[in-house]
């Protein structure tokens, strides 16, 4: 084993494996303006007119010095209580949040799939499949060839693919989002609670597809409150507490320690 220093944190690098994501002493700080302010919009406008002081600003230190390496082919679960920094970490890896300090390095293009993935509610499922595939960089020919596979994977009831997305249940929408994202091989796929509303049959299909994605290309990150899902689909789990690394290792061991500590 070779060892390399990552901005003051020691991280062991396996020379026989290929790193695909390196998180290097990462700090993410949000600036929240107007926090703690009182009154309604009219009173706020009156203060502006009177040229009173600007709204107060509060800094939220969401990620506090995280460092780890993920290798090509790994499926990594991210667990922690609400507000611990899980979703923030995925957004940082996806390049959607700039580091306050430290950095994130990826070999390839990360793709973030979340419960609010950008499907258009007024368009049909069919149109969303086409637009979603094209947005991921698939050609029209590839989109056409994968279309029925996506419909079948999502398990939508007969005819619903022609209905607007606003008529879908949360479970149907989540299944379609995952089916679209999983139609393409990703360098790094980041899944944020997108499997939360799926039934047992869909989770089985999702696990199989995640295994395929790991073999075909890069790494998969999964945030889910269902700990059984994390243990089933991941070969490694990172536990974040208050934006800091609490534990990183075997899914059974990390989840067991998390349950003992939190009672969840």
Image (spheres, helix red, strand yellow):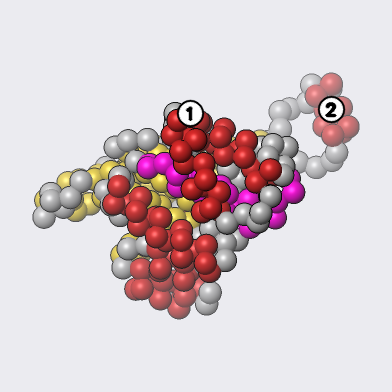
Q: CA distance from mark 1 to mark 2?
A: 49 Å
In the image, taking residue 75 as reference, residue 164 lies left or right, namely right
Quarter of the figure that contains the N terminus: bottom left
Residue 222, given in percent of the width and then of the height, sits at: 44, 55
Query: In terms of secondary structure, what is the magenta stretch mainly?
Result: helix
Circle on res. 45: 2
Residue 130, given in percent of the width and then of the height, sits at: 56, 34
**How packed is label 2: few (under 14 Cα within 10 Å), some, or many (20 or more)?**
few
Instruction: Please state which of residues 161 and 216 is positioned toward the viewer in this rendering.
Output: 161
Give the magenta part as a residue range. 166-186
Q: Secondary structure at mark 2?
A: helix
In the image, taking residue 222 as reference, residue 40 lies left or right, namely right
Instruction: Please state which of residues 243 and 172 is positioned toward the viewer in this rendering.
Output: 172
In the image, residue 148 above or below residue 95: below
Residue 17, given in percent of the width and then of the height, sits at: 17, 50
In the image, residue 71 above or below residue 230: above
Residue marked by disc 1:
140
Residue ID at (34%, 53%) = 212
Residue 171 on the magenta span: yes
Looking at the image, tell me whether mark 1 or mark 2 is earlier in sequence order.
2
Asked whether disc 1 touches disc 2, contact meaning CB atoms under 8 Å apart, the reply is: no
Which quadrant holds residue 123? top right
Residue ID at (52%, 62%) = 202
Residue ID at (41%, 46%) = 189
């Amino acid at each position: 084993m070779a060892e390399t220093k990552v901005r003051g944190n020691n991280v062991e690098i396996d020379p026989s494996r290929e790193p695909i994501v390196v998180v290097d002493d990462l700090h993410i700080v949000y600036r929240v303006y107007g926090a703690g302010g009182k009154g309604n919009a009219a009173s706020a406008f009156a203060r502006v007119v009177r040229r009173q002081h600007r709204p107060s600003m509060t800094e939220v230190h969401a990620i506090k010095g995280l460092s780890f390496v993920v290798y090509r082919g790994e499926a990594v679960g991210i667990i922690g209580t609400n507000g611990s920094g899980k979703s923030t970490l995925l957004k940082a890896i996806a390049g959607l949040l700039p580091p306050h300090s430290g950095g994130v390095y990826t070999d390839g293009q990360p793709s973030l799939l979340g419960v609010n993935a950008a499907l258009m509610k007024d368009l049909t499922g069919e149109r969303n499949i086409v637009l979603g595939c094209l947005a991921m960089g698939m050609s029209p020919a590839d989109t056409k060839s994968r279309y029925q596979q996506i419909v079948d994977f999502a398990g939508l009831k007969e005819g619903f693919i022609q209905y607007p997305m606003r008529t879908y249940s949360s479970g149907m929408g989540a299944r379609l989002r995952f089916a679209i994202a999983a139609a393409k091989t990703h360098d790094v796929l980041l899944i944020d609670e997108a499997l939360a509303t799926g039934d047992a049959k869909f989770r089985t299909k999702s696990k199989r597809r995640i295994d395929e994605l790991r073999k075909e290309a890069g790494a998969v990150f999964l945030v889910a409150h269902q700990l059984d899902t994390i243990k089933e689909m991941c070969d490694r789990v990172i536990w974040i507490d208050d934006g800091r690394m609490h534990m990183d290792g075997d899914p059974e061991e990390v989840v067991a320690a998390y349950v003992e500590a939190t009672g969840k």
